[in-house]
Image (cartoon, grey):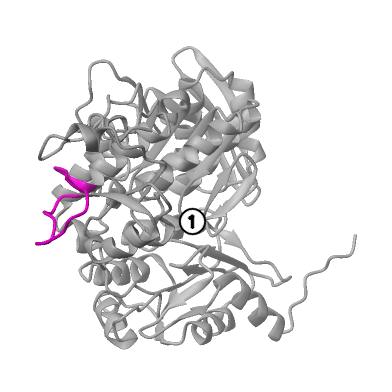
C-alpha cells in the first residue's frame, strides 16, 4: 500500500514529498522486533522506553520509514515523518492499512470502574446465542472466532486491536465486544475506532496514580461516548442509578438505553429473585417484557445482565435469544468464582481491587445470608496509595473477619502497602490479622471459616501470577485455596 494512503487523515507536521508519498509499504509496527522488509516503524514514547531508541534496529530489520512526534536525530539520513500525535497516528494508519475493519463489524465497547469483564462475557454470549461469529477482547483473555489468545492489556494497543478485528473479518466474523479501559482511552488505543454500542457500567474511584484526579479519570471514560477521532457510538447504554454517569453529555444522534433498578431507568429489572443458584427476574422496557435467568449471583450482576440485554436489543436481537444467551453464561473466571472441595462453607475468588468493588462483592455475599463473611484482600504496589485506607475501611465495615495480605506489591515493600490499608481497617472494631505471605494468608482465612460462612479471596481473581519486586512468580488464588482445603482434609464428592 502507498505510504500516502496509509497516512491519509493523519496529522503531519510537514507535507510528504512525492517520492516519500509514493513509497510502497508492506507492514507497520511500533515494536522493532516485529519489523520486516518495507515496513513503516512508529517511534513514540512508551511507559518504560522511548521508541526512538530502536530506530536503527528497525531499519536493520527492513524499516524504510519512521513516523514520530519528535524530530529526527541530528545527522539522520533516513526517511523520517513528523506526525502531530504518535499514538493517534498509529491508530489511524492501522485502520487505513487493514481497510477499516471496525466499520464492518458490530463493535461494542464497555467502560466503567467495575463490571466490564462480566458484562463483556454476557454480551458475547448473547451475540453467540444469536448465531454471530464473535471476538471478545478484555482483561482475562482475547477470543477470536473460537480461538483463545493471551491478553496483554485489557485493551490492546491500536495496531494489535485493528489486527484482531481484521482477522475476525477474515474469518467471516460479525461482532466484537471489548473492554475499553480509561488508560486505553487516554492513550488513544481506540482513537478513530467506530463503535456501534458503548456501555458505561459505573464510575467510582480508581487509577488516580495514572489520571491524577477523578475529573481526569471521568474525562477519559467520556471519550468513548464522544467518539474520539471517530463519530460517536450509534447507541449508548448507561447505568441510570449512577449519579456520575447521569451527567454525561451525548451526541443528539446517539440512541440511549438507561438501565438500572431505580424509577428513572427505562430498562429495568422487576421481581428479582437471588439465591445460591443464581438470578431470576423480568426485564422491562416500555411495553416489552421478558424473563431472564442466570447462574450468576448477586445484585451487581443484575446490572451487568441489564447492560447486556440493552446491547442485545441495540443489535435487534430477539428477547428470547437474549434470554438464552444470558442463561448460557455459567461463570466468569475470577468473578465470585467458587472453589469447592466439599467444605461446609463457601470460598469465592474475586478480582475486586477497589473499595467500591470490595463493597459490592461483600454485599453480594451478604445477600446469600451467610453466618459470617471473611474477607482477604491486599492492595497493589506502585498504584494509587490513597485508595488503600479506603479499601481497608470498606473491608472492615462490611466483613466479620479481615485478613490483610499482599496483592501484587511490585517495587514496594509489602508491609508498607499493608500498613497503608491498616489505617482504614483500624477505624473499625473488627477482628483482623496481618499476613504478608499471600499463600499463608489464604490458609489463615480458610482455617478461620466455619460451616455457613463465606470466605472472599479478593484482589487477584483470574490472575495466575504475583508480581514481586525482583520477579514474577506463578500464583493462582483458586489453586492455592484448593490445595489448602485438601490439606485441611476436605474432599469433593464426585460420586454420582
Q: Secondary structure at mark 1?
A: loop
Looking at this view, name the residue that lies furthest to the right. Answer: 496
Residue at the spot of label 1: 151
Q: Is residue 109 left or right of residue 210?
A: right
Residue at 42%, 43% (x, y): give it. Answer: 161
* Whether residue 10 is situated above or below residue 30 in the rendered picture: above
The percent position of residue 259, horizontal first and vertical second, equals: 39, 30
Q: Using the image as rendered, state which of residue 165 and residue 432 is in the foreground.
A: 165
> In the picture, which quadrant includes the C terminus?
bottom right
The percent position of residue 478, horizontal first and vertical second, equals: 59, 70
> In the picture, which quadrant includes the N terminus?
top left
Q: Which residues are magenta?
A: 68-86
The percent position of residue 322, horizontal first and vertical second, equals: 59, 27
Residue at 64%, 82% (x, y): give it. Answer: 484
Q: Is residue 13 left or right of residue 170?
A: left
Q: Using the image as rendered, state which of residue 395 and residue 54 is in the foreground.
A: 54
Residue 184 appears in the rendering: yes
* Quarter of the view holding residue 290: top right
Magenta run includes residue 139: no
Amino acid at each position: 500500500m502507498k505510504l500516502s494512503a496509509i497516512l491519509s487523515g493523519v496529522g503531519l507536521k510537514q507535507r510528504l514529498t512525492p517520492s516519500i508519498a509514493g513509497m510502497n509499504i508492506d507492514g507497520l509496527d511500533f515494536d522493532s522486533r516485529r519489523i520486516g522488509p518495507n515496513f513503516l516503524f512508529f517511534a513514540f514514547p512508551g511507559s518504560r522506553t522511548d521508541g526512538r531508541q530502536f530506530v536503527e534496529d528497525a531499519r536493520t530489520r527492513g524499516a524504510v520509514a519512521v513516523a514520530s512526534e519528535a524530530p529526527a536525530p541530528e545527522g539522520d539520513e533516513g526517511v523520517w515523518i513528523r506526525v502531530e500525535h504518535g499514538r493517534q497516528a498509529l491508530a489511524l494508519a492501522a485502520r487505513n492499512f487493514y481497510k477499516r475493519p471496525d466499520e464492518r463489524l458490530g463493535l461494542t465497547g464497555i467502560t466503567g470502574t467495575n463490571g466490564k469483564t462480566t458484562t463483556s462475557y454476557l454480551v458475547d454470549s448473547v451475540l453467540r446465542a444469536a448465531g454471530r461469529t464473535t471476538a471478545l477482547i478484555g482483561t482475562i483473555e482475547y477470543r477470536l472466532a473460537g480461538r483463545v489468545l493471551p491478553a496483554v492489556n485489557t485493551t490492546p494497543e491500536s495496531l494489535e486491536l485493528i489486527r484482531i478485528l481484521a482477522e475476525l473479518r477474515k474469518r467471516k466474523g460479525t461482532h466484537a465486544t471489548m473492554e475499553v479501559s480509561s488508560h486505553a482511552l487516554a492513550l488513544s488505543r481506540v482513537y478513530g475506532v467506530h463503535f456501534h454500542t458503548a456501555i458505561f457500567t459505573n464510575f467510582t474511584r480508581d487509577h488516580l496514580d495514572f489520571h491524577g484526579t477523578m475529573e481526569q479519570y471521568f474525562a477519559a471514560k467520556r471519550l468513548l461516548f464522544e467518539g474520539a477521532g471517530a463519530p460517536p457510538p450509534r447507541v449508548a447504554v448507561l447505568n441510570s442509578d449512577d449519579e456520575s454517569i447521569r451527567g454525561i453529555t451525548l451526541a443528539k444522534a446517539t440512541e440511549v438505553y438507561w438501565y438500572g433498578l431505580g424509577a428513572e431507568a427505562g430498562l429495568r429489572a422487576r421481581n428479582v429473585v437471588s439465591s445460591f443458584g443464581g438470578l431470576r427476574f423480568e426485564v422491562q422496557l416500555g411495553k416489552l417484557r421478558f424473563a431472564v435467568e442466570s447462574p450468576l449471583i448477586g445484585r451487581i450482576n443484575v446490572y451487568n445482565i441489564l447492560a447486556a440485554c440493552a446491547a442485545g436489543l441495540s443489535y435487534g436481537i430477539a428477547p428470547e435469544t437474549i434470554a438464552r444467551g444470558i442463561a448460557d453464561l455459567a461463570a466468569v473466571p475470577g468473578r465470585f468464582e467458587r472453589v469447592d472441595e466439599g467444605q461446609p462453607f463457601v470460598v469465592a475468588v474475586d478480582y475486586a481491587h477497589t473499595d467500591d468493588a470490595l463493597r459490592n462483592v461483600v454485599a453480594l455475599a451478604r445477600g446469600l445470608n451467610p453466618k459470617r463473611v471473611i474477607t482477604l484482600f491486599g492492595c497493589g504496589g506502585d498504584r494509587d496509595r490513597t485508595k488503600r485506607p479506603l479499601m481497608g475501611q470498606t473491608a472492615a465495615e462490611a466483613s466479620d473477619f479481615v485478613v490483610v495480605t499482599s496483592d501484587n506489591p511490585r517495587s514496594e515493600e509489602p508491609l508498607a502497602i499493608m500498613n497503608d490499608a491498616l489505617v482504614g481497617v483500624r477505624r473499625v472494631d473488627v477482628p483482623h490479622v496481618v499476613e504478608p505471605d499471600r499463600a499463608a494468608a489464604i490458609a489463615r482465612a480458610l482455617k478461620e471459616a466455619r460451616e455457613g460462612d463465606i470466605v472472599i479471596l479478593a484482589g487477584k481473581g483470574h490472575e495466575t501470577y504475583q508480581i514481586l519486586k525482583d520477579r514474577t512468580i506463578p500464583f493462582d488464588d483458586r489453586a492455592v485455596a484448593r490445595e489448602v482445603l485438601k490439606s485441611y482434609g476436605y474432599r469433593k464428592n464426585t460420586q454420582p
